[in-house]
Amino acid sequence: MRVREETFDTYWRFATLRQEVFFNKINNTPPPWTNDPIINTYKFCNAYRASDRVSQYLLKNVIYDDNRSKNEEEVLFRILLFKIFNKIETWEYLEEKIGNYITLSNFDFKVYSSILQEAMNLGYVIYTSAYMSCASKEFGYDKKHQNHLALIDKMVVQDRVVNRIVKAKNFEAVFQIIQEYPLLGKFMAYQLATDINYSEIINFDENSFTIAGPGAERGISKCFLDTDGKTYTDIIHWMTENQENEFQRLGLNFQSLWGRQLQAIDCQNLFCETDKYCRAAFPDLKSNRKKIKAKFTPTPQPIDYFYPPKWGINEKVQKTLTQRLPPLKIPDLQHNCQQLSLELDPLLETKSDKSDKLSKSHKQYKQETQKKKSKNVQNSDTEKSHQLCLF
C-alpha cells in the first residue's frame, strides 16, 4: 500500500480542523473559526455525520420527539419518509399542509403526492441537493416523488419490513434487507440503515459494516497511490481502527465527539469531504469533479445538539451547551430571514418577492461581514508518497 502523503495527511488535518470549527461554533466563539482559508470559504459536512444539521433534525424532530409515537413501525415510517427527500423544509411543508404530525394513520398516497406536487408547482425543490436519488418509474408513476411514496407504502404498509429489520442478526443484514427494494442503491441503503440504527429499533456496532459512496471512492483514490488490491471497505475500516495513531503521528489535537471516536460512517464521509477539499488544495489531482460548488454561509440559529441516547454522551453535550458564551448578535439576519422554507427553483426565484427580499438580506449580511479574500493554497509540483502497511 502506498499513500499520497500530502492528501493522506490532509484527511486527518481536515478532520481535526472541521471538528475545531464545530466546537468553536458551539461555544459561540467569534468567527473566523479556523485559519484554514478553504474551510472558511466553502461548505463542508461535519467530521461526525450525526452532527450535521439534517441529521440533528432527524434525531430530535423525527426519531426522538417526545410528542411522536415510539412504535417501531411508526419510527421506521418516519425515518424513511424524511430520508427519501432528506430535506427539513419538505418534511415541515408536509406537516403544515396535513395540519398534524406525520403518522402512518394519516399517510395517504394521493394526499401526500398532491401536497408535494403543489409545492413543486410553486417552484419549490423538494429533494436534497446533497446526493442524487434514483428517478426511475419503478412503480409506474411519471413523477419521481410518486414512485418514492409508493416505495415507502410497499416497504412499511404492504411488506411490514420492520419485522424483518428487528430480527436482523447484524448491521449488514439490515443493509441487505433495504437494498432488496428498488430505487435504493447500495449507498442509499447504507445511509438508511445507519439512520435506522440511530433509533431504538436496532442497536448494532456502526463499525461492524461499511461501504464507500462515490465521493468516498474519489477521496480514497486521491489519498492512495496504490491500494494493493484492498477494497474501499478495507481502507475505511483501517482508518477507523488507526485514527488515534494517525492523529498522534501528525501531532494533531483532534477533539472527539465528547469521547466518541470517529465511526466507520464518519471515516467514509471524511473521504468524501477530503475529495472536496482537495479540489481547492490540490487542483492538479485528476478528478471528474474540479470545483467545490457550495460556499459557506452561517446559519442564524445555533443547534442544541442531541445524539442517540444509547451513545451515552448527551449529559456531556448538555454540560458543554450550558457553558457556552452568549450567542453573537448578527445584525438584521434573524430579522430578515424567515423560518426555514423550501428553496425556490432558480428559474422561478425572480418571480417571488419573498425570495428577492431574502436574497437582498443575505447580500447585505455578506457585505457587512466579508473578510479579506484568502490566498489560494499553492499546490506542490512534486508528489510525495510513503509506504503504509494497512494489514
Image (tube, rainbow, N blue to C red):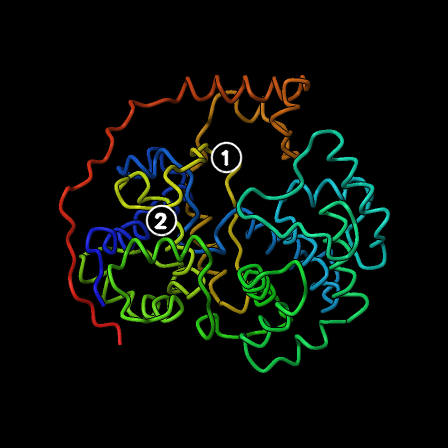
Characterize the local packing of mark 2: few (<14), some (14-19) or many (20 or more) Cα atoms within 10 angstroms: many
The image shows residue 93, relative to residue 274, as above or below, that is above
In the displayed structure image, the side of residue 207 where residue 65 appears, left or right: right
Residue on which the image places disc 2: 275
Q: Nearer the viewer, residue 158 or 14?
A: 158
The image shows residue 140, relative to residue 379, as above or below, that is below
The image shows residue 262, relative to residue 341, as above or below, that is below
In the displayed structure image, the side of residue 265 where residue 122 appears, left or right: right
Q: Quadrant of the N terminus?
A: bottom left
Residue 231 image-quadrant placement: bottom left
Amino acid carrying mark 1 in the image: Thr
The residue drawn where x is 68% and y is 42% is 90
Give the spatial CA distance, label 2 vs label 1.
24 Å
In the displayed structure image, the side of residue 264 where residue 89 appears, left or right: right
Q: Position of residue 326 (x, y in %)?
A: 44, 36
Q: Which mark is residue 299?
A: 1
Amino acid carrying mark 2 in the image: Asp
Q: Nearer the viewer, residue 182 or 51?
A: 182
